[in-house]
Structure formats: structure tokens, C-alpha cells
Amino acid sequence: MRRLIGAGNYSRPNKKEHISRSPECRNVYERATKFAETKQSPRITVFYLLLALLEEANIQQLLVKSGIDLTEISQVLKGEVVLQPQQQKVELEDTIPIDKVVSEMAFFETKYRKLLDRISRIANHAQHIQALLERVIEAISEDFPGAERQTIALLEENELVPREFWPPGQAFIDFALAEQASKNGQVMHWVTKASDSEEFSFGRLESLYAPLSFQGELLGMLHIESRLAHFGSAHLQLLQILAGILAPAIKVRQPNVLPKLPTVFISYVREDRPLVNLLAADLRRRKIKVWYDLRLQVGENWSEKIDRAIQTSEGFILIMTELSVTSPYVLQELEAALRSRRPVLPLLFRDCQPPLVIEPIQRIKMSGQNYADGLEQLVRFVLRLPK
């Protein structure tokens, strides 16, 4: 698209820079940049960038002449089809077994001594687990080289829950990468690239994941990432030592005294699982616990387990698509939620007729470009529910 739009020249003297772009490209770029700074969501920003491009008549003609089919893109932007998670290229750079012996004394003699000494004091003296987590995140934010985002997530009833993170607002942990690190029992260094194209690239993200384990029991995950720094083996070893200090400190303090987080139950059909996985991850990053059938264990009575999960949740989320609103299992779960007087939160991912029993309930649009705003609306509603 950049080749098609062509190059032009304009300056921004207030920022002391000169950028070579055509007027159309300048307009599109600035609109997408403004949205990115507001929403901090690269995936959604890409779609707003496309929307801005398609609103330029000259660009439409250029794209059509180049053989680009605009129909599918237009459908996505108008909310007629559901956005799927962005495909990214994730490369494993390095690993360290979590139980590998690393000399702490050697590290104490390096530039990392200040951070290690600070974390050790926090682990020894913090009275409550919440204070422990808050102070550890603060220390990592200030003293871990290159750390831009950090998360401490704890394992609670087979669900990895971000309990403390920086910056505030939402965690940025990738649950798939965290699961890989916990399964392998390794501290892992990942590099994520959203595009292989050097000409139109969305950058590079480096992330470290360290399982928090004590005597073979997985307690949670320590996560650090940066879009600017380049991590190496020393950073991996440092994170391993930090996890080794933090895990026993968490174990000896009772995690059940942590503040109660709201829990929602998600009802859906299996064909919509990619949507549910995306939604569940986004809710968990905002300190909302999520229950859906992936948490069922082998040998459990699934009917009793689901009924109990609905009764103990603060809200019932119904994923509305043409398949889910006619599914007998979804309708049974909806009936159970109404019997238990759970607040029902219908999320409209595709146009469909709602079940009659919830037709008067206001629905949240989640399709296409509505997803980001719908998610924030949903989060505000859930956080206001009585616990």
C-alpha cells in the first residue's frame, strides 16, 4: 500500500522531523497514530488504518487497479464478519530450566546487585501477599534493565490470573506463551514479530516468562517484556533468580487473602472457541476471572460443574452467533443462569435473533471494529457487579 500511495514530503517543525509521505498517506498515518496512542491496541489500529485508507477515493482506485479485492476488507470494517486474532510470528530465542542452579553470588557482584538485593528484602519483610506483589512489580519496573511491562500472575483453581502488573490498566501477558513456559518448566525468551515485511512492519516485541514454582508446585508466572530492549542470556538468568526468590515468598503467604476478583461464565458453541479464547484473555488481563468449559478436568461431572460455575459467577456472558442462539447446550446454560438470577450479558458477535427470554436485554456489539469499544463497555459493566 505504501508503494501504491507514493511518496510526498511534509514537515512537523514542532517535533523537529521531516517525513516523506503523500498527503493521503499523511492523513491516514496521523489518524491511525492518534488511535494507537489512545487505545494502545496494534491489532485494532491496523483495521482503523485500513478504514482510513478505504475512505480515500484515490487510494480505492489505486488498490482496485492493482488487483486488490476490497470486498472482504470492507465487510470486516463494517462489522459484517468477526475479527480473528492477528497472526504473529513468535520465535523462541533461549531457555533455561527453572531448576537449573545459577550462582546468585556471581550475580550479586554484577550490575544486577541492586535489584536482587531489593527483591530479597521485599521477600523477607513484606507482611501480606498483596504488598509483596506490588513492591516486587515496583522494583522490577525501576531496576530490571529494559523492562517496559511486567506481570505477576498466580494460578488460582487452574486459571492463570494476573494479580499485579505495570503499567496499570491491563496486563500484557500472553497466556499461550505462559502456558508453554509452565509446561516445559523453563524460563523462556520469546521474540514476537507482527509482520515479516521490512517495508511495512509493526515492530518487534521481546518477552521473558519464568514459572513461579516451589518444590514442584506451579504457583504462577513472572512476565517481563519490552518493545525497545534486547534481552540476552544474562536477563534470563536474572529472571530465573528473581522467580526463585519470589516463589517461596508467595507460598508462605496465603494467596486466599488476596482481594476477590469478579468471575464471569462464558456460554458458547465450540465453533466460536477462537473468539472465546480471545475474549477470555482480554478479560483476564483486566483482572476479571473467566470460567468456560476449557477448565473442566477429566473425570468430572460436567453438568454439575457447569451449574456450580454459573451459580458462583457474578455474571453470565452469552456469545451470540447464528449457531449459539440455537444450541440446546447454550440454551440450557442460559436457563440455569436465569434460575440462579445471574446478570446476563449478551455479546453480539454476528447478527442473529436472540432467544426470546433475553430479547429485552441490551446487547453489546462486538463484531468488527466494535470489538475494542464493546470490550471496554463489558469490562466496566462487570467491574460494577456486586461480588
Image: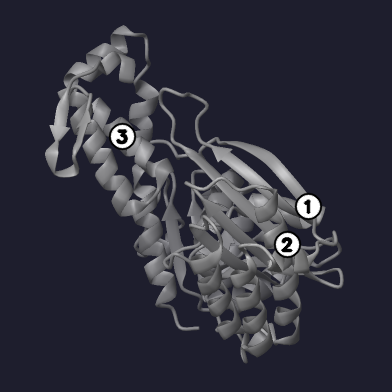
At which x and y percent is residue 337? 55, 71
Q: Secondary structure at mark 2?
A: helix
- The correct choice, above or below, for 32 with respect to 50 in the image is below
Label 3 neighbourhood size at 10 Å, few (<14), some (14-19), many (20+)? some
At which x and y percent is residue 309? 65, 72
Label 2 neighbourhood size at 10 Å, few (<14), some (14-19), many (20+)? many
> Which residue is more in the foreground, 138 or 130?
138
Q: What amino acid is at disc 1?
A: Ile
At which x and y percent is residue 59? 23, 19
Whether pointer 2 and pointer 1 mark residues with C-beta atoms closer than 8 Å, the reply is yes
Mark 1 or mark 3: whose residue is earlier in sequence: 3
Quadrant of the image occupied by residue 160: bottom right
Residue 49: which disc?
3
Q: What amino acid is at disc 2?
A: Gln
Which residue, given by chain and number where applicable, does mark 1 sit on?
96
Quadrant of the image occupied by residue 150: bottom right
Q: Nearer the viewer, mark 3 or mark 2?
A: 2
Real-space CA distance between mark 2 and mark 1, rounded to the nearest whole angstrom: 8 Å
Residue 240: which disc?
2
- What residue is rendered at 31% in x and 34% in y? 49
Label 1 neighbourhood size at 10 Å, few (<14), some (14-19), many (20+)? some
- What residue is rendered at 85% in x and 62% in y? 101
- What residue is rendered at 65% in x and 37% in y? 91
> Which residue is more in the foreground, 223 or 1?
223
